[in-house]
Amino acid sequence: MTGLVALLRKELCELLRTYRVAVVLAAFVLIGLGSPLTAKLLPQLLSTLATDPGGGFELLLTRDPTTSDALFQYQKNLAMVPVLVILLAMGSLSGERRRGTAQFVLTKPVSRTAYLLAKLLAPAALYGIGTSVAAAGCLLYTWILFGAVDLAGFALLNALFLLAIWFYLALTLLASTLLESAVAAGGVGLAGFALCSLLGSFDRIGRYTPGGLQTAIADLIRGTATGAPIAPVLATLLLIALCLLFAQRLLRRQEL
């Protein structure tokens, strides 16, 4: 993989120059700090809007929020991060082909496999850092507002989120390799996100898809997990590998 280090340096500089690092980290900070705060304050806000003290709406507000509520809010907020991932990655290869940047880079002594991996590893590292930042913020505010959190389960929860994010990154890179339009590549990524979310709602099928990671996360929060979520993890890792394999083969055959 000739030139991987140099290409990684280029991708990291590109992330910094286009302010994507700032955008991604800001989003993760808001998710990490905002989720426990939302879980704590939203019921109080809704209770002030209740106009029927004897109605069912008031009954929904009688239970005080708990640690699980904060973590479920964290899950809901992080579950939309793949949309941001897809939008930021959809022009990774198609955009550079259109601008001629890819042709310029690949005339250097670098391999196309290294070029593809750099496109994956740089943002993957950024999302890893972002997830860590969000996890730290959520852990701190949840501890302050609600009490202690199971650290092992919380760490696994975030690892599953990160794996899902990496899958959508790999899928969008494959679409960006296949299609010349960044918008079309983004559409494929969003369609994949919608499909995986839908399949994840079916127990028998969903456990073998990236959507099953969300079910596993919910089980961890509820404390009903009966074991490690091996099936969705292995299925997601396999799909990431397939996306990269197909993208690498397409890139090798393309005339740039």
Image (cartoon, helix red, strand yellow):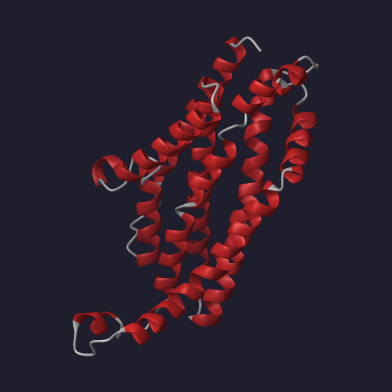
Q: Locate residue 50 relative to residue 244 in the image: left or right.
A: left
- Image quarter of residue 1: top right
Image position, residue 142 (x, y; %): 52, 75
Residue depicted at x 40% and y 45%? 230
- What is the quadrant of the C terminus in the image? top right
Residue depicted at x 65% and y 29%? 117
Q: Above or below — where is 43 with respect to 154?
A: below
Q: Is residue 182 visible?
A: yes
Image position, residue 168 (x, y; %): 49, 39
Image position, residue 99 (x, y; %): 69, 23
Closer to us: 171 or 2: 171
Image position, residue 114 (x, y; %): 69, 24
Q: Is residue 63 visible?
A: no
Q: Locate residue 252 relative to residue 22 in the image: left or right.
A: left
Q: Above or below — where is 233 with respect to 130?
A: above
Closer to us: 57 or 206: 57
Residue depicted at x 39% and y 61%? 220
Q: Above or below — where is 176 with respect to 252?
A: below
Residue depicted at x 56% and y 81%? 144
